[in-house]
C-alpha cells in the first residue's frame, strides 16, 4: 500500500509511543501495591500519553506524510526501523485508545474482585501495549518479529495471573503454540528471505521491498506463504487456534484487551503485512496455490462459528467468535485485492471495538454476579440494563449491521471478494454472519426476554461505575466508527 | 616374510617405533577407560603419556646421528676444534651460526626432545594431582573402586536430600566448625575428616 | 602501550604468585589482588584490541627472546599472535574473569573457608592459561597452556566437596586423553611440516600442497578428536555435568562460561588458520560426518537436560547442547555458519555466565538449586531472577538478547548450506530450552506442584509463609556482577552489529562459501 505523493520525515514520536509505557512500568512498580491510586494514575497517564502521541500523527498521515524513526542497526542490512503508515497508525490508534478504556475498566474489575498482584498485572499490561505499538509501527519484517516475541513473553504473566493449575495449563498451551510457531516456523522463513532475497541485501522493508519475493520460484513462494501465515500463530488461524480459548483463564481485562485487541490483532496485523507489503497484491494474484489460503480462512470462519454455537461458557463463546472474526481479517488479506486488504485492516479496528465491548460486558457480569455461563443469564437484562444494552450493541456490530462499525469492514471484504472474482466467498460471509447472529444474539435475548429461573437470587446491581463507563464508551464507539468510516477508509488507502 | 613392501615388513622393520607406541597407547587407553580401580586408571594414564613421549623422541632420531651438541668440527668458536681451513675465517664469531646443511646431518633433531621435557613436566603434574584426588576420594568414601564409589555417592545423595529438606539448618553447622578449626589451624586434616565422619552415622 | 599483549599475562600471573605468597600472612588480601589483576588484564586486553584494529593486517605479534620472523618456515622462536578472533575471545575470558572475581568474595569465603589464597592462585592461573590458549601462536605451547588451564581447573573443582573430587577424577582422565591426543596430532604435524608455529604450519601446508598427505590427515583427526573431547562434545561429554554441578559456586561460574568456549575457539583456529579452509573442509570427511554427529549431540544433550530437576545440572547439559550448536556452525561450512559459531562463542559465554551467577545466588538464598525449592523466588529476589531469566531468554533465543542473534546466524548458515537436519535440530533444541526455562518460571511463579496439585488457596497464594516470600535479595557483591552480566547479554545483543562486523573482518581473509541461493 503506497500512495503516490508521500513525504517521509524523521521524527521521534513513534519511539515515544513505544517507550512511554516501558518508562511507565518503572513508575508502576515504584508505586507498588501500597500506593494503589498512584499506581493506577501512572497507568492511566502513560496510556494517555501514548494515545495522544499516536493521535497527533493522524493529521500528518492524512496530509500524506509518513513518519519514520531509525532506532538501531540490527543486522548489516536490516535496521530496527519504526514507520507510521496508514495500516499501522489505524491499528495503533485502536490499541492505544482501547488501552485507556481498559485501564479504567481494570481498575473497577481488579478492585471489585480484590485480585492479587495487581502491580504485576499493570506492569506487564503496559509492556504488552508497548510491544503492540511496536508491531503497529514496524517498518520491516525483522522489526515486527522483534516486537512480536516481546509480546508473547510479556503476556505470559498476565495469562497465568491466577497462578493455579488451570493457569498452568492455559499458559502452557499459550506459550507452546506461540513460541513453537514463532521460533520454529517463522524464524526459518525470515532467515530464508534474509539470505536469498537479492543475495542478502534486502531489509524486507514493507515499503521498499514489496513484491521482491516474486523472484523466488512458485513452490518457494507457496512454502513461504504457508510458513508466514501459520508462523504468526497469534492470528489464531485453524488449526493453530487452540491457545486462544486456553488463554481465557486470564482475568477479563486481559482477555478483553489482549485476546480481542492486542495479541490476536497483532497476529492478523502481521499476516496482513506479509500479504500486502512483503508479497504484494500483484505477486499474490499470480500465485497459483494462493486460493487454498482463501479456503483455509473461510474454513476457519465457519468452523469456529459452529464451535461457538455449542459453547455455554460466555468467555469461551466469545473466544471462538474471535477466532472466526480473525478469519475475516485473514480472508481479506488472502483475497489479495486493494479492497480486501483495506477491508481486513478496517476489520481489525471495527472488530476490536465490538469485541472489547462484549468482553467488558462478560467481565462486568462476572464482577456483579459471579456468573460465567450463558444459560445463567436469564432475566439479567432488567437488572443490568446498561451492561446488557452494550452487549447487544457489541453483538450487532460484530454481526455487521449498519449503522455500526462492523458493517463497513464486512462491506469492503465483500467488495474485495468480488474484485477477486470469488463470488462464493460472499456466500461464506453471509452464512457466517448468520451464524454470528445465532451465537451472539441469544445471549442478549436470554438476558432481556427470558424470566429468571428463580427469583430467590440475591439482589443484583450493575457492576461498579469503573466497569460500566468504559463498556458504554466502547459501545458508543461502535456507532462512532461507522460515522467516521470515511477518514479511516482513506487511511488504509482506499477511496470511498 | 620380511620382503620390502609388505605390511608386516613395514610394521615390524621400517616403522617398529610407531608400532610399539601405538600398542602402548592402546594399552594405556584401555586401562584408563576399562579399569575400575582408580590407581589402575592412573597407571594407564602414565603408559598413555609415555607412549606419546616415545613417539616424539623417536621422530627426532636419524640413522647414524648423534646428540645435538656441536661436534668439534662444527664449533664456530673453535675451542674444541681441530684447526682446519674451512672455519678459520669464522674463528672469532660469537653467537649462533647458521651451519651448512650438509654438515648438520649428523645431529638428531633436538626439538622433539625438548618438547618432551615440557610434556613430562606436565605429565608429572597431572599424575601428582590425580594421586592427590585419589587420596581425597579414599578419605571421603573409603574406597577407590569406581563401582563402589558410585554406589556410595548415590546412597549419600539420597540421605543428604532427605536431611536438607528436613533440617536445613544442620547443614550450616559443620561449616562453622570447619571455619573455627581452620582458623586455629591446630587440627590436622585427617583429624577433621575423622571427626566429620561419624556424623552421618550419628544421624542414622 | 606497546607490549600490552604481554601485560594481559603479566597481571594474572604475578597476581597469582602474589596471592600465594601474601595470602599466607593475610587471607583477606587475595580478593582485591584477584580483582585488580583481572581488571588490569582486561585493560591490557582492550588496549591490545585497539592495537590489532589499528594495524593493516589486523594481527599483532609478540616474540619471545628476541627471535625474528625472518626465517622460513616462520617462527623458530615462540610467538604470541593476536588476531581479531583471538583477542575477542581473550576479552570474553578476561571479562568473565573480572565479573566472577568480583562475585567471588562471599562464596569463596563460605564454601572453601581458609583456602582463599589457594583458590585465588588457581583462579588467576586458570585465567592466564585460558587467555594464553587464545593468544598463543605456537601449536605445542597451545598444548602446554591447555594443560595449565586444565590442571588449575581440576584444582578449582576439587577444592570443594568430596563429590567434586570424585567428579574431577573423571574430568582429569578424559581431559588428559583429549590433551594427549592433541599432542600426538601436533607430533604428526611436526613430522610433516617441521615447524610448530601456527602461521608457519599453514604456510607450509599451502606451499607444499599437503592436503592429500595421509600424515596430515591423521594429524587432523587426532587434533580434532582431542579438542572435541576437551570441549565436551556429546559422546565425550561425560565429565562435564558432574564436574560443573558439584564444583564450588565460583568455580562453576568461571569454568562453565569459558572453558568449553575457548576449546571451540581452538577448533575454529585450527580449522581456519592452521590447517586452512581448503584442507579442513574439502580434503576431509568432517563436513559430511560432523553435522550428523552434531544432530545426535544436540538431541541427546537437550533430552538429558530435560530430565534434570536441579538448576546447575540442567545448565551443565545445556552447555553440552550449546557446544553442539557451535561445532555444527563450523562444520556446516559456510560464511554465515562461522559468523554464527564465533558470535555464539561470545554470546554463550555471556549468557552462561549470567545463568551460573544467578544459580549461585539462588543457591545462597534458597539453600537449594533443586526445582522444588524455587517457589516464590520472584517476590523474594526479583532482581536476581530478572538477571537469571535474561540469561535464560538468551539461551532460548528471544530478541534482543545476544542469543537470538547468534542463533539467527546459525540458522541462516544451516539454510545456506542446505543442512536441513542441522536447522531442524536447532529448532528442536530451541523448543526444549523454551520448556526448560518456562518450566522453571512455572515452578517459581505458580502455586502448583510438578504433578499438578494446587498448593496455595488461589489468588496468588503460593502456599508459603510471609517470611519465605518477603523481599530478600542476595548481597550486593554478588548481585551487581549478575546484573552486569545480564546487561552485557543485552548490550552484546543490541550492538551485535559491532561484534559481527569485527568477525566479518576476520573471516574476510578466508575463502568461505556464502551460498548460491535456491530460488
Image (cartoon, coloured by chain):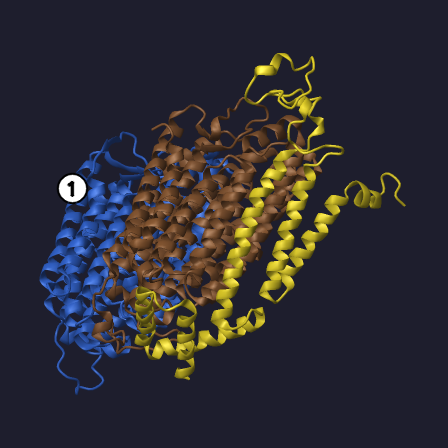
At x 40% / y 29%, what residue is drawn?
A: C52
Which chain does tag 1 point to? A
Q: Nearer the viewer, residue C223 or B19?
A: B19
Above or below for A326 versus A376: above
User: Residue A8 location, x and y as percent?
Assistant: 25, 31
User: Residue A116 location, x and y as percent?
Assistant: 20, 70
Chain C colour in the picture: brown
Q: Nearer the viewer, residue B44 or C517?
A: B44
Say which element carries label 1: helix
* Residue pointed to by mark 1: A56
Above or below for B188 versus C335: below
At x 62% / y 59%, what residue is drawn?
A: B43
User: Residue A287 location, x and y as percent?
Assistant: 49, 42
Is residue A165 visible to the viewer in this orientation of the structure?
Answer: yes
User: Residue B1 location, x and y as percent?
Assistant: 90, 45
Across the whole image, how many numbered discs are drawn on residues?
Answer: 1
User: Which quadrant holds residue B78?
Assistant: top right
Q: C76 left or right of A180? A: right
Crowdedness near tag 1: few (<14), some (14–19) or many (≥20) residues, C-alpha within 10 Å: few
Which quarter of the figure is the C terminus of chain A placed in? top left
At x 57% / y 15%, what residue is drawn?
A: B92
Q: C495 left or right of A121? A: right
Is residue A234 visible to the viewer in this orientation of the structure?
Answer: no
Which quarter of the figure is the N terminus of chain A placed in? top left
Q: A59 left or right of C34? A: left
Chain A colour in the picture: blue
Q: B123 left or right of A389? A: right
At x 61% / y 67%, what residue is drawn?
A: B36
Chain B colour in the picture: yellow
Q: Nearer the viewer, residue C259 or A477?
A: C259
Amino acid at each position: 500500500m503506497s500512495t503516490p505523493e508521500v513525504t517521509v520525515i524523521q521524527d521521534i514520536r513513534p519511539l515515544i509511543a513505544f517507550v512511554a509505557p516501558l518508562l511507565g512500568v518503572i513508575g508502576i512498580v515504584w508505586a507498588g501495591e501500597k500506593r494503589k491510586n498512584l499506581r493506577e494514575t501512572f497507568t492511566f497517564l502513560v496510556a494517555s500519553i501514548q494515545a495522544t502521541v499516536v493521535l497527533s500523527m493522524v493529521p500528518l498521515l492524512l496530509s500524506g506524510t509518513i513518519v519514520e524513526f531509525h532506532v538501531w542497526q540490527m543486522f548489516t542490512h536490516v535496521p530496527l526501523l519504526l514507520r507510521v503508515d496508514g495500516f499501522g497508525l489505524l491499528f495503533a490508534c485502536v490499541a492505544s485508545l482501547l488501552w485507556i478504556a481498559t485501564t479504567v475498566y481494570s481498575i473497577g474489575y481488579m478492585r471489585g474482585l480484590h485480585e492479587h498482584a495487581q502491580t504485576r498485572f499493570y506492569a506487564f499490561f503496559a509492556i504488552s501495549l508497548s510491544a503492540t505499538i511496536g508491531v503497529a509501527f514496524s517498518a520491516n519484517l525483522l522489526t515486527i518479529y522483534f516486537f512480536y516475541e516481546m509480546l508473547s513473553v510479556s503476556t505470559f504473566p498476565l495469562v497465568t495471573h491466577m497462578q493455579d493449575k488451570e493457569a498452568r495449563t492455559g499458559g502452557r498451551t499459550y506459550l507452546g503454540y506461540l513460541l513453537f510457531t514463532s521460533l520454529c516456523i517463522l524464524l526459518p522463513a525470515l532467515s530464508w528471505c534474509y539470505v536469498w532475497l537479492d543475495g542478502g541485501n534486502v531489509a524486507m522493508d514493507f515499503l521498499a521491498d514489496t513484491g521482491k519475493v516474486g523472484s523466488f520460484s512458485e513452490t518457494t513462494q507457496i512454502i513461504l506463504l504457508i510458513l508466514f501465515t501459520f508462523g504468526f500463530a497469534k492470528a489464531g488461524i485453524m488449526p493453530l487456534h487452540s491457545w486462544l480459548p486456553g488463554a481465557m483463564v486470564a482475568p477479563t481485562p486481559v482477555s478483553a484487551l489482549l485476546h480481542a485487541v492486542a495479541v490476536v490483532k497483532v497476529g492478523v496485523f502481521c499476516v496482513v503485512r506479509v500479504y500486502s507489503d512483503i508479497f504484494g497484491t500483484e505477486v499474490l494474484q499470480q500465485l497459483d496455490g494462493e486460493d487454498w489460503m482463501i479456503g483455509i480462512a473461510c474454513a476457519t470462519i465457519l468452523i469456529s462459528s459452529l464451535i461457538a454455537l455449542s459453547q455455554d461458557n460466555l468467555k469461551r463463546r466469545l473466544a471462538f467468535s474471535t477466532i472466526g472474526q480473525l478469519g475475516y481479517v485473514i480472508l481479506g488479506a488472502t483475497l489479495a485485492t486493494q479492497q480486501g486488504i483495506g477491508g481486513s485492516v478496517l476489520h481489525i479496528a471495527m472488530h476490536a471495538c465490538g469485541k472489547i465491548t462484549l468482553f467488558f460486558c462478560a467481565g462486568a457480569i462476572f464482577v456483579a454476579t459471579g456468573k460465567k455461563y450463558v444459560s445463567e443469564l436469564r432475566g439479567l437484562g432488567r437488572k443490568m440494563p446498561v451492561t446488557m444494552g452494550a452487549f447487544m450493541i457489541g453483538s450487532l456490530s460484530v454481526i455487521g449491521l449498519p449503522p455500526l462499525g462492523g458493517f463497513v469492514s464486512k462491506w469492503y471484504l465483500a467488495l474485495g471478494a468480488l474484485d477477486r472474482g470469488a463470488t462464493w466467498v460472499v456466500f461464506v460471509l453471509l452464512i457466517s454472519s448468520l451464524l454470528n447472529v445465532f451465537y451472539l444474539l441469544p445471549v442478549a435475548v436470554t438476558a432481556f426476554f427470558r424470566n429468571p429461573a428463580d427469583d430467590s437470587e440475591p439482589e443484583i446491581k450493575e457492576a461498579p461505575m469503573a466497569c460500566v463507563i468504559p463498556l458504554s464508551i466502547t459501545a458508543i464507539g461502535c456507532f462512532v466508527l461507522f460515522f467516521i468510516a470515511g477518514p479511516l477508509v482513506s487511511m488504509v488507502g482506499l477511496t470511498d | 616374510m620380511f620382503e620390502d613392501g609388505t605390511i608386516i615388513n613395514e610394521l615390524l622393520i621400517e616403522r617398529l617405533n610407531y608400532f610399539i607406541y601405538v600398542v602402548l597407547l592402546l594399552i594405556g587407553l584401555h586401562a584408563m577407560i576399562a579399569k575400575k580401580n582408580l590407581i589402575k586408571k592412573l597407571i594407564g594414564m602414565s603408559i598413555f603419556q609415555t607412549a606419546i613421549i616415545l613417539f616424539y623422541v623417536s621422530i627426532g632420531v636419524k640413522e647414524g646421528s648423534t646428540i645435538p651438541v656441536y661436534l668439534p668440527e662444527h664449533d664456530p668458536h673453535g675451542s674444541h676444534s681441530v684447526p682446519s681451513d674451512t672455519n678459520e675465517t669464522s674463528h672469532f664469531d660469537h653467537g649462533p651460526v647458521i651451519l651448512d646443511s650438509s654438515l648438520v646431518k649428523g645431529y638428531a633433531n633436538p626439538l622433539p626432545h625438548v618438547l618432551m621435557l615440557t610434556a613430562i613436566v606436565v605429565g608429572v603434574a597431572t599424575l601428582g594431582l590425580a594421586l592427590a584426588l585419589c587420596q581425597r576420594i579414599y578419605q571421603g568414601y573409603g574406597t577407590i573402586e569406581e563401582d563402589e564409589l558410585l554406589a556410595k555417592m548415590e546412597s549419600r545423595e539420597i540421605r543428604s536430600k532427605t536431611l536438607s529438606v528436613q533440617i536445613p539448618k544442620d547443614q550450616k553447622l559443620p561449616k562453622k566448625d570447619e571455619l573455627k578449626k581452620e582458623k586455629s589451624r591446630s587440627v590436622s586434616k585427617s583429624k577433621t575428616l575423622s571427626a566429620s565422619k561419624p556424623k552421618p552415622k550419628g544421624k542414622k | 602501550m606497546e607490549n600490552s599483549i604481554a601485560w594481559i599475562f603479566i597481571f594474572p600471573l604475578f597476581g597469582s604468585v602474589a596471592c600465594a605468597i601474601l595470602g599466607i600472612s593475610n587471607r583477606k588480601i587475595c580478593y582485591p589482588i584477584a580483582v585488580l589483576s583481572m581488571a588490569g588484564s582486561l585493560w591490557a586486553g582492550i588496549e591490545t584490541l585497539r592495537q590489532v584494529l589499528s594495524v593493516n593486517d589486523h594481527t599483532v605479534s609478540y616474540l619471545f627472546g628476541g627471535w625474528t620472523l625472518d626465517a622460513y618456515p616462520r617462527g623458530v622462536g615462540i610467538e604470541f599472535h593476536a588476531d581479531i578472533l583471538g583477542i575477542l575471545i581473550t576479552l570474553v575470558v578476561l571479562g568473565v574473569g573480572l565479573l566472577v572475581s568480583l562475585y567471588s568474595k562471599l562464596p569463596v569465603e563460605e564454601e572453601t573457608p581458609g583456602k582463599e589464597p589457594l583458590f585465588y592462585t588457581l583462579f588467576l592461573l586458570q585465567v592466564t592459561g585460558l587467555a594464553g590458549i587464545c593468544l598463543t601462536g605456537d601449536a605445542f605451547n597451545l598444548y602446554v597452556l591447555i594443560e595449565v588451564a586444565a590442571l588449575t581447573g581440576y584444582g578449582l573443582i576439587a577444592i570443594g566437596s568430596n563429590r567434586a573430587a570424585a567428579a574431577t577424577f573423571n574430568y582429569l582422565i578424559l581431559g588428559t586423553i583429549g590433551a594427549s591426543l592433541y599432542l600426538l596430532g601436533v607430533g604428526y604435524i611436526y613430522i610433516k611440516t617441521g615447524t610448530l608455529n601456527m602461521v608457519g604450519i599453514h604456510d607450509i601446508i599451502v606451499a607444499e600442497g599437503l592436503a592429500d598427505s595421509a600424515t596430515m590427515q591423521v594429524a587432523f583427526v587426532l587434533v580434532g578428536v582431542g579438542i572435541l573431547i576437551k570441549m565436551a562434545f556429546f559422546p565425550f561429554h561425560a565429565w562435564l555435568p558432574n564436574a560443573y554441578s558439584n564444583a564450588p559456586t565460583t568455580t562453576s561460574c568461571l569454568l562453565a562460561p569459558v572453558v568449553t568456549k575457548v576449546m571451540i575457539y581452538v577448533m575454529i583456529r585450527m580449522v581456519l588458520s592452521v590447517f586452512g579452509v581448503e584442507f579442513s573442509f574439502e580434503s576431509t570427511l568432517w563436513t559430511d560426518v560432523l553435522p550428523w554427529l552434531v544432530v545426535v549431540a544436540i538431541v541427546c544433550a537437550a533430552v538429558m537436560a530435560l530430565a534434570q530437576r536441579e538448576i546447575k545440572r540442567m545448565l551443565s547439559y545445556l552447555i553440552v547442547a550449546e557446544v553442539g550448536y557451535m561445532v555444527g556452525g563450523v562444520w556446516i561450512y559456510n560464511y554465515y555458519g562461522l559468523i554464527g559459531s564465533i558470535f555464539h562463542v561470545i554470546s554463550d559465554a555471556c549468557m552462561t555466565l549470567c545463568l551460573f551467577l544467578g544459580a549461585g545466588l539462588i543457591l545462597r538464598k534458597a539453600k537449594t538449586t533443586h526445582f522444588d525449592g524455587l517457589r516464590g523466588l520472584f517476590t523474594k529476589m526479583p532482581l536476581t531472577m530478572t538477571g537469571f531469566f535474561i540469561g535464560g531468554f538468551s539461551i532460548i533465543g528471544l530478541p534482543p538478547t545476544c542469543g537470538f542473534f547468534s542463533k539467527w546466524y546459525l540458522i541462516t548458515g544451516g539454510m545456506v548450506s542446505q543442512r536441513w537436519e542441522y536447522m531442524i535440530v536447532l529448532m528442536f533444541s530451541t523448543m526444549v530450552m523454551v520448556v526448560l526455562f518456562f518450566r522453571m518460571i512455572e515452578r517459581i511463579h505458580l502455586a502448583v506442584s510438578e504433578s499438578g496439585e494446587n498448593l496455595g488457596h488461589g489468588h496468588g497464594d503460593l502456599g508459603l509463609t510471609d517470611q519465605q516470600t518477603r523481599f530478600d535479595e542476595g548481597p550486593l557483591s554478588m548481585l551487581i556482577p549478575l546484573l552486569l552480566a545480564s546487561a552485557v547479554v543485552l548490550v552484546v545483543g543490541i550492538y551485535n552489529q559491532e561484534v559481527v562486523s569485527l568477525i566479518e573482518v576476520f573471516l574476510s581473509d578466508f575463502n568461505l562459501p556464502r551460498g548460491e541461493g535456491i530460488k
